[in-house]
Image: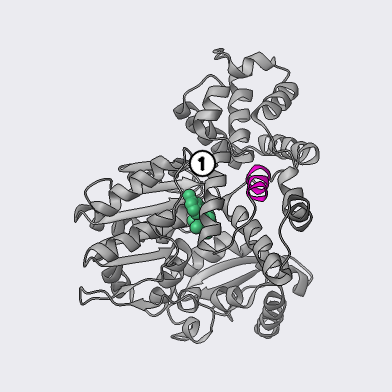
Amino acid sequence: MTTMNIETIWPRVCKILRARLNPDTFSRWIAVIMPKKESSAAVLTLMVSNDFYQSWLEENYLGLIKDVVHEVCGQPLQIQFEVNPEAAPPDQTINNEAPGARKNAPAKKSVAAGRESEITLNPKYVFDSFVIGPSNNFAHASSFAVAQAPGKAHNPLFIYGGVGLGKTHLMQAIGHYILAQSKMHVYYLSCESLMNEYIDHLGRRRLKQFRDKYRTTDLLLIDDIHFLARTNQLQEEFFHTFNVLYDAHKQIVMTSDRPASEITGLEQRLVSRFEWGLVTELSHPDFETRLAILRFKQKAFNVVLPEDVLVFIASRIRSNIRNIEGALNTLTFYSSLNHESMTVPLAEKLLQNSLEKENIEPLTIDTIQRAVANMFDVRMGDMASKHRSQSVAFPRQLAMYLCRTLTKASLPEIGSAFGKTHATVIYSCRQIGKQINTDQQLKQVVEKLTGQFNKSAPLL
Ligand code: ADP
Ligand code: MG
């Protein structure tokens, strides 16, 4: 490739990438790249200003860049990254309006302590508006204990569970409580915002500022920590932040969509730290809790729906609390516009879309066990047997893994369906998870089974 080529090729590659990526992604990750003029005929060298960009691009965008370069050049080229601190003009990322951290810049809220807590907490997410039931009472009690004695009761607190089950609500309730009761300094932010902020500081060579900020707070609330696994450098940074805060008895609270041990790519030293304190799960609310939540919410919304309509929503919308709120919103909005009293048939009509989604039969542990037993030619009874021979143990581990990834069953539920403890389920999932990354054949088996389930019983 000649110098001339690179200078014409790269702008064309960028043009295509700009069209395929969202503007934030493009300006954060692609606009910072400078192609090296001295690239050889078969290798295109792309320069970036620090190794964080390099590893992030390699992990997330290398395939796409390769494809587009292939498209533009009409032949595949090898792509390599090189770190060159001069590569990106200073403040380049800052001038592009991309960075999510600033876009989602937290509102400043003063607290009496003199230093400010930079947080935006939803005023609705307080303990008083959290309805307690069997699915969440342990998580609620643990959160309340932490709020009453930060840094002392359970540190760290790790709350995990599926989407829309109240993780953010509980975490913010801790923040509200502590801000109201004390002069403590609090940070609440999503892991994604933390990452964006980290990158901004890195780009501006102000890591010390970033460190000072998060290592000196009294309470650090990080929402959706599972995103941490996306980048090794932030894991490293967070590891040290965690240690400093923990050693100083400062409270750390994290939420995640799964237990730390199941976050693929999360370093072991972080997994174990995340489990040092208290780990608590939010599971799916039962009918009574769903109804109690509806009753509570309608009071908060200042509306009154007939009891049979509330029962109808609670019995038909089971997947998560956010959807229950959505249904209530729809009906309330309709009533306010039409001044028509709500009835069950009318509610059924208005909620048709949400109900259709809810009606899809969720995949069950039993279906998975049956399909795996079939595929590996073992007896259904072997799924819960004590046989340890590899011919039985492997399909059993695989079935546990599929149950964990494809159903909403909790670890104890899966454990009991396989006659195992929940620690064995975690171990099995980890084994299979690791193996899938290296064993092409296993990967295909998993894809085949997943495809089969999707046809017969689409997932919610
Ligand atoms: P997650 O972070 O787990 O995805 P959220 O905390 O955002 O879920 O909760 C989704 C919605 O459901 C929020 O509006 C929240 O207030 C509400 N919610 C969740 N659990 C409860 C509960 N136990 N009582 C009242 N509202 C709840
Ligand atoms: Mg959340």
The answer to whether mark 1 is within 8 Å of ligand 1 is no
Colouring style: one colour
Label the magenta part by its dominant secondary structure: helix
Q: Which residues are magenta?
A: 307-316
Between 156 and 450, the one nearer to me in the picture: 156
Q: Is residue 426 magenta?
A: no
Between 149 and 298, the one nearer to me in the picture: 298
- Counting from the top left corner in percent of width and height, residue 252 is at 31, 55
- Tell me: 78 left or right of 74: left
- Tell me: 288 left or right of 379: left
Q: Residue at the spot x=70%, y=43% of the render?
A: 459
Q: Residue at the spot x=23%, y=76% of the render?
A: 115
Is residue 183 visible in the rendered image? The answer is yes
Query: Is label 1 in a helix, a strand or a loop?
Result: loop
In the picture of the structure, the residue carrying the numbered disc 1 is 283
Quarter of the picture containing the N terminus is bottom right
Q: Quadrant of residue 375?
A: top right
- Counting from the top left corner in percent of width and height, residue 275 is at 35, 42
- Counting from the top left corner in percent of width and height, residue 257 is at 51, 49
**From the viewer's perspective, is residue 449 above or below residue 186?**
above
- Tell me: 140 left or right of 243: right
Q: Is residue 312 magenta?
A: yes
Q: Quadrant of residue 322?
A: bottom right
Between 11 and 249, the one nearer to me in the picture: 249
Q: Residue at the spot x=52%, y=59% of the render?
A: 299
Q: Residue at the spot x=44%, y=82% of the render?
A: 86
Q: Quadrant of residue 170?
A: bottom left
- Counting from the top left corner in percent of width and height, residue 31 is at 58, 80
Is residue 66 visible in the rendered image? The answer is no
**From the viewer's perspective, is residue 425 above or below residue 217?**
above
**What's under tag 1, amino acid-wise?**
Ser
Question: Dot 1: few (<14), some (14–19), or many (≥20) neighbours within 10 Å?
Answer: many
